[in-house]
Amino acid sequence: MEDCTTTTKSLMTTMDTLTSRSKKLVKLLERLIKQEHLYNDEKIREMKAQLKVVKEQIAQIEKENSKGFGK
């Protein structure tokens, strides 16, 4: 049976990985949106909506895992 410390470290590693992937997704979406001439208005709106969702999720994760002031 795993102890609490090992489980917590595993969870933190998983959260770091998800946050890292999410930040890469944000950068990708921002680059794609800048090239709006390649997409129709519907696709641009969809990408912007997804970008907003991902940014909100990152902010929520960082808020929950904050170890400093302002919590």
Image: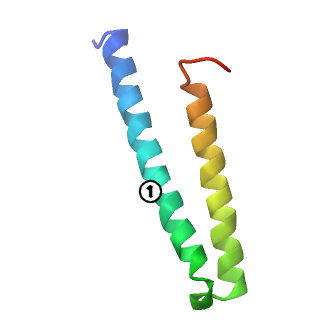
What residue is drawn where x is 67% and y is 57%? 52
Query: Residue 6: image x %, image y %?
Result: 31, 16
Query: Residue 38: image x %, image y %?
Result: 57, 89
Which quadrant of the figure contains the N terminus? top left
Task: Indicate the quadrant where residue 71 lies.
Answer: top right
Relative to 61, 14 lies left or right = left
What residue is drawn where x is 42% and y is 51%? 21
What residue is drawn where x is 42% and y is 46%? 20
Residues packed near mark 1 inside 10 Å, few (<14), some (14 to 19) or many (20 plus): few
Relative to 62, 40 lies left or right = right
Label 1: state its secondary structure: helix
Amino acid under disc 1: Lys
Relative to 71, 28 lies left or right = left
Residue under pointer 1: 24
Q: How is the image coloured?
A: rainbow
Task: Indicate the quadrant where residue 2 lies.
Answer: top left
Query: Residue 53: image x %, image y %?
Result: 66, 54
Taking 7 as reference, is 16 above or below it?
below
Query: Residue 9: image x %, image y %?
Result: 35, 21
Question: Which one is in front, 70 or 25?
Answer: 70
